[in-house]
Image (cartoon, rainbow, N blue to C red):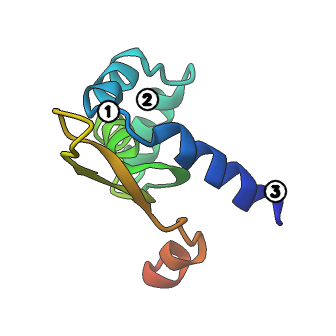
Amino acid sequence: MHMSVLGYRQRVACLAGLPVSAMATVKAGLELNEGALELCQCLRGLGCRLAVVSGGFMPLILHVQERLGIDHAFGNEVRLRRTERHEAPCVTKVCGCVDLLVPLRTYSWK
């Protein structure tokens, strides 16, 4: 099995049964790399369109997208639902590993 698929499956397994509030906790502690905001602002000022393509999960990617003013975001979708074991919504499925070529085929980066 390819290492990237193994890593993906391991990350997905860690999410199973987590309450939705876990994503909020991670978002609150998420730190941007030094200079990331300034770089994005500079590039946008020059007329560049920005995208983030990540093997991470969309709730967190969308948070980064908003903070940095990025135009497009691609990542792994997470499905949430209530279960008999959990009163609050929890992660029940990750909907496929992101295909990194889709954004490159979909958008013109001129």
As drawn, is 27 to the left or to the right of 16? left
Question: Disc 1 vs disc 3: Cβ atoms closer than 8 Å?
Answer: no
Residue assigned mark 1: 67
| Amino acid type, mark 1 | Arg
78 vs 63, nearest the viewer: 78
Residue 63 coordinates in the image, percent (x, y): 32, 37
- In the rendered view, would you say 103 is above or below 54? below
Answer few, some or many: residues within 10 Å of disc 3's Cα (few below 14, many 20 plus, some between 14 and 19). Answer: few
Q: Amino acid at mark 2?
A: Leu
Tags 1 and 2 touching, CB below 8 Å: yes
With respect to residue 110, does 78 lie above or below? above
The residue where tag 3 is placed is 3
Q: How many marks?
A: 3
Please tell me which residue is depicted at 46% across the width and 40% down the height of the picture: 15
Question: Few, some or many C-alpha atoms within 10 Å of disc 1 (few <14, some 14-19, many ≥20)?
Answer: few
Q: Which residue type does callout 3 highlight?
A: Met
Location of mark 2 (residue): 37
Does residue 74 show up?
A: no
Mark nearest the camera among 1 and 2 is 1
Mark 3 or mark 1, which is nearer the start of the sequence?
3
Residue 37 at what x, y percent from top left? 43, 29
Taking the spot 53% from the left edge, 48% from the top edge, the residue there is: 12
